[in-house]
Image (spheres, grey):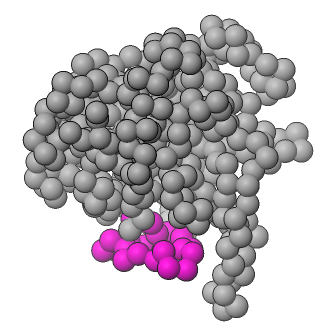
């Protein structure tokens, strides 16, 4: 028997408007900056119209990316709430692929913007075997002091011991597939922040992600036993906002692009994989084909990297030793620069920058449960 599990940062699946751009230009959409807007009432009207028009195209592309992955269970990030997820599933996914994802669960995490993690699943696998939701547990309440994870590096960032570890949540979800238990840990780690104290955004926010990774490992060890997890089926799924390697892009469209792989000296991902605790199965793909996000701040700073992960317990990794995950890239905007031979046919109506399915790519893998 098998089940197909996927992770996807759906990029701001919201069911509310954000009018903060009227007073804070940093939050104002670039399209509205082209117009003279006389007052807040007019701004709100224009923002509603812009958001609705943009959202319909975007969510059609998001649904196409989900449909292309053919997953039974989806671990999602950046979901506003269950109402938003239900409306998206019914209005877009169900109309597109028919048989819907009936079971949906989320948690109210710690993100100040209100974007949460969620799980969405069918009640049967593609082979007709039952998928049963058993329970979900949020760990959003955990503090650095609770797990003894407070460090001088965190203190230097202005963080105090009683603050919560997870910037969103670690949502533990127990399911049974044809009666066999599988536990999912759905996460969305701290994003890379602006440069600080002479360090770039990734380095300056690294201590927070290291603590988040250590907390996830501790939660799993307390549940299944430290060093004794080999017989258990669990998967860490989500946007970890960090990478161990990247592909640095040089050149331009006229002279031709160059693609140079580079390894990172430090990564919070190592906290999870150290000692064979789990396996990042995306690393089973060739080095140039592991990326799930295109990052750019202009021609001087461009790279491809893996931010989205399926990390298998030793038992699942061994049982699926020859299986390689799929990455769906057809929803990427046209500005994404693909290495030679990796170009895909984009979904209809995909734009240069937007609309797009998401800035992230879904990652999916079929797991045999033995």
Query: Which of the 4 image quadrants contains residue 162?
Result: top right
User: Can see residue 242?
Assistant: yes
| Prevailing secondary structure of the magenta residues | loop
Quadrant holding the C terminus: top left
Q: What is the tally of numbered marks visible in this picture? A: 0
Q: Is residue 42 left or right of residue 27?
A: left
The residue furthest top is 146
Q: Is residue 24 above or below residue 139?
A: below
Give the residues drawn in magenta, as a range. Answer: 331-358
Residue drawn at x 67%, y 37% is 270
At which x and y percent is residue 1? 20, 39
The residue furthest right is 198
User: Can see residue 59?
Assistant: no
Residue drawn at x 10%, y 52% is 98
The residue furthest bottom is 254
Queried whether the magenta region covers residue 332, the answer comes back as: yes
Nearer to us in this view, 12 or 203 = 203
At which x and y percent is residue 84? 29, 39
Q: Is residue 277 above or below residue 261?
A: above
Residue drawn at x 53%, y 33% is 278
Q: Is residue 167 left or right of residue 223?
A: right
Query: Which of the 4 image quadrants contains residue 256?
Result: bottom right
At which x and y percent is residue 47? 42, 54
At which x and y percent is residue 352? 48, 74
Q: Is residue 69 left or right of residue 314?
A: left
Queried whether the magenta region covers residue 297, the answer comes back as: no
Query: Which of the 4 image quadrants contains residue 286?
Result: bottom right
Residue drawn at x 61%, y 57% is 305
Nearer to us in this view, 352 or 125 = 125
Q: Is residue 148 left or right of residue 85?
A: right
């Amino acid at each position: 028997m098998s089940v197909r599990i996927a992770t996807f940062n759906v990029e701001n699946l919201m069911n509310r408007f954000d009018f903060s751009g009227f007073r804070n230009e940093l939050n104002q959409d670039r399209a509205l900056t082209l117009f003279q807007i006389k007052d807040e009432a007019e701004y709100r009207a224009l923002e509603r119209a812009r958001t609705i028009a943009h959202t319909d195209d975007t969510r059609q592309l998001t649904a196409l990316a989900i449909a292309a992955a053919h997953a039974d269970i989806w671990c999602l990030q950046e979901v506003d709430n269950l109402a938003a997820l239900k409306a998206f599933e019914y209005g877009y996914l169900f109309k597109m692929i028919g048989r819907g994802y009936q079971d949906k669960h989320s948690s109210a995490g710690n993100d100040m913007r209100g974007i949460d993690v969620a799980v969405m699943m069918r009640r049967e696998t593609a082979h007709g075997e039952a998928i049963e939701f058993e329970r979900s547990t949020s760990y959003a309440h955990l503090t650095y002091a609770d797990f003894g994870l407070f460090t001088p590096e965190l203190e230097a960032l202005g963080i105090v011991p009683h603050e919560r570890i997870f910037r969103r949540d670690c949502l533990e979800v127990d399911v049974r597939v044809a009666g066999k238990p599988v536990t999912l840990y759905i996460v969305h780690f701290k994003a890379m922040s602006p440069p600080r104290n002479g360090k770039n955004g990734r380095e300056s926010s690294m201590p927070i992600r290291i603590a988040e990774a250590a907390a996830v490992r501790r939660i799993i060890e307390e549940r299944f036993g430290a060093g004794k997890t080999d017989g258990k089926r669990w998967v860490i799924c989500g946007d970890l906002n960090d990478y161990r390697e990247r592909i640095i892009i040089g050149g331009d469209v006229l002279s031709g692009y160059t693609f140079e792989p580079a390894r990172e000296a430090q990564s919070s991902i190592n906290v999870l994989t150290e000692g064979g605790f789990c396996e990042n199965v995306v690393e089973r793909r060739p080095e140039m084909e592991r990326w799930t996000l295109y990052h750019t701040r202009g021609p001087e700073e461009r790279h491809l990297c893996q931010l989205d992960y399926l990390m298998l317990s030793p038992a699942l990794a061994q049982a699926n030793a020859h299986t390689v995950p799929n990455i769906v890239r057809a929803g990427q905007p046209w500005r994404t620069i693909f290495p030679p031979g990796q170009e895909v046919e984009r979904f209809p109506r995909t734009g240069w920058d937007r609309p797009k399915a998401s800035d992230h790519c879904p990652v999916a893998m079929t797991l045999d449960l033995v």
